[in-house]
Amino acid sequence: MSFFNNLKNIFTKDSKDRYLSGFSKTNEAIGAKLKIITAGGKVDPNTFLEELMVTLLEADLGYKTAELVCNEFEKEMKNYVAMSSRDVFIILKKVLKRIYGDENSEIVLNDNGPTVILLVGVNGAGKTSTIAKLAHMFKKEGRSIALVAGDTFRAGATEQLELWANKLELPIIKGKENQDPSSVLVDGCRYAKEKQIDILLCDTAGRLQTKVNLMNELSKMKKVIGREIEGAPHDTWLVLDSTTGQNGLSQGELFNEATKLSGIILTKMDGTSKGGIVIALKNLLKVPVVFVTMGETMEDLRPFDLTLYLDSILKEMEDENL
Ligand SMILES: Nc1nc2c(ncn2[C@@H]2O[C@H](COP(=O)(O)OP(=O)(O)OP(=O)(O)O)[C@@H](O)[C@H]2O)c(=O)[nH]1
Ligand SMILES: [Mg+2]
């Protein structure tokens, strides 16, 4: 079984409830709202599409993706004489699944040495705490892990990661304040090769997607890591705060241009009704969401699972139709 599917099996099999609670605010925004609109079991097609559009926009699917969902929904609607709320539930799930497309979230482990994973994103998105959550998950899965404190810019950033490293009893490779982050990453790669570490998780400083020199710094980091370990970084994940709203799409676009992302980690799902951004990101950027976080403890990370996600954001409607 692939590494990612194995993680899914271990960490999502019995955690449907955690998914549901993590997406409860988005479920309020989509599932509960549509449940009210479709209550009584008869849907007027003329007004429903308008209401669907507003609901999807409020859940942060963004205009383009919400419009696509409504168009696809309208096509499906034609097969129905009168639509019950159960029909709406079934059609919407089918349409969202189709628009999301292939789940395509695989983590390819390096067979010939350490797998290097780089986390990037704007300030405060959740990079450092997500590194701790990932380390905890991968460690539980039986992998050897080391952390690299690649944020040499913000005062206290290294200490923050060090606290997690101590808690998780993991080695940490760090530099001095304001040291070139690329050189710290090189040290990390050399350490990982020497100690035969399975997965090297690299933290980076928060940066605005519009600051060209900071985005170029990321390209440099990727280049130097690639010189140390063939194919590294094997994954570059954008950590995106899901409460940000549509600016998340701009972050996705510009980070993808600068560093060719292999996945997105959506954080802080517990605090937002904007979980619809998952669909928008995949539809517009073609970059899959690989993990979601839904709280501040080490356990609050889950591999992304499309079926569980759709069940979670439409939960209220599903209950109606049991
Ligand atoms: N509620 C909630 N809080 C989260 C989640 N993920 C991260 N946080 C909080 O968000 C804050 C910022 O997280 P960090 O991991 O420090 O973010 P960062 O991207 O490393 O920030 P910089 O290093 O400053 O760029 C912390 O208080 C985290 O505890 C989440 O899933 N849910
Ligand atoms: Mg940080």
Image (spheres, helix red, strand yellow):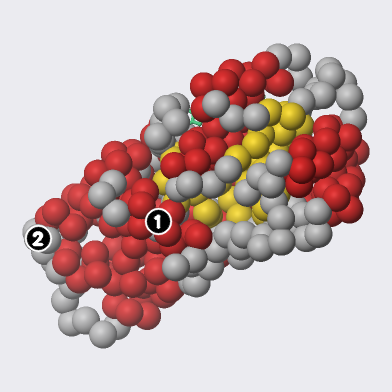
Position of the N terminus, as image quadrant, is bottom left
Residue 25 x/y as whole percent: 33, 39
Question: Can you say whether 244 is above or below 8 in the image?
Answer: above
Q: Residues within 10 Å of mark 1 (few under 14, many from 20)?
A: some
Position of the C terminus, as image quadrant, is bottom left
Identify the secondary structure beneath mark 1. Answer: helix
Identify the secondary structure beneath mark 2. Answer: loop
Q: Are marks 2 and 1 in contact (CB under 8 Å)?
A: no
Question: Can you say whether 205 is above or below 29 in the image?
Answer: above
Residue 312 x/y as whole percent: 30, 51
Q: Residue at left 62%, top 59%?
A: 109
Amino acid type, callout 2: Leu
Is residue 30 among what the camera can see?
no
Question: Can you say whether 256 is above or below 84 in the image?
Answer: above
Residue furthest to the front = 195
Residue 322 numbered mark, or none: 2
Residue ID for mark 1? 8
Question: Can you say whether 129 is above or below 210 in the image?
Answer: above
Name the mark nearer the viewer: 2 or 1: 1
Is residue 40 among what the camera can see?
yes
Q: Residue at left 32%, top 66%?
A: 93
Quick check: 135 left or right of 285? left
Between 321 and 43, the one lying in front of the other is: 321
Q: Residue at left 29%, top 63%?
A: 48
Q: Quadrant of residue 38?
A: bottom left
Residue 30 numbered mark, or none: none
Residue 278 x/y as whole percent: 49, 53
